[in-house]
Image: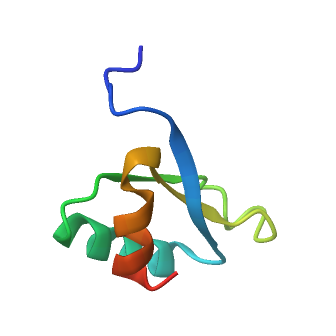
């Protein structure tokens, strides 16, 4: 059951490694933006897939500014 009511989630960026994704997620958290990592545990098995950093669509503009995307 999804308990979030913030709207749809979107992929902000895809990273080749978990460390880079976690650092970006920390920057978003410092800016008050909730984010989620997807596939961070399988990147070792399938490095081509990458780690997806997801956010709520309502936070897109602020997240882009925060990470200079």
Residue 48 falls in which quadrant of the image?
bottom right
Q: Which residue is drawn at 18% across and 61% down?
A: 32
Near-viewer residue (45 or 32): 32
Q: Which residue lies furthest to the bottom in this view?
A: 68
- Quadrant (top left/top right/bottom left/bottom right) for the N terminus: top left
Left or right: 53 in relation to 63:
right
Q: Where is residue 38 in the image (x, y as percent from the top left)?
A: 55, 51
Q: Position of residue 51 (x, y in %)?
A: 61, 63
Q: Which residue lies furthest to the top in this view?
A: 1
Q: Where is residue 69 in the image (x, y as percent from the top left)?
A: 52, 81
Q: Is residue 54 above or below residue 28?
A: above
Indicate how the structure is coloured in the image: rainbow
Near-viewer residue (23 or 9): 9
Q: Which residue is drawn at 30% across and 68% down?
A: 28
Residue 63 falls in which quadrant of the image?
bottom left
Q: In this view, does 20 lie above or below 33?
A: below
Q: Residue at x 31, y 21 (%)?
A: 3
The count of marks equals 0
Near-viewer residue (27 or 59): 59
Q: In this view, does 68 lie above or below 53?
A: below
Q: Residue at x 76, y 71 (%)?
A: 47
Residue 30 falls in which quadrant of the image?
bottom left
């Amino acid at each position: 059951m999804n308990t979030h009511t913030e709207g749809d989630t979107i992929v902000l960026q895809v990273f080749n490694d978990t460390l880079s994704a976690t650092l970006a997620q920390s920057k978003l958290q410092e800016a008050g933006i909730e984010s989620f990592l997807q596939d961070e545990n399988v990147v070792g098995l399938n490095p081509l897939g990458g780690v997806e950093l997801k956010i709520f669509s309502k936070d897109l503009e602020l997240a882009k500014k925060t990470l200079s995307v």
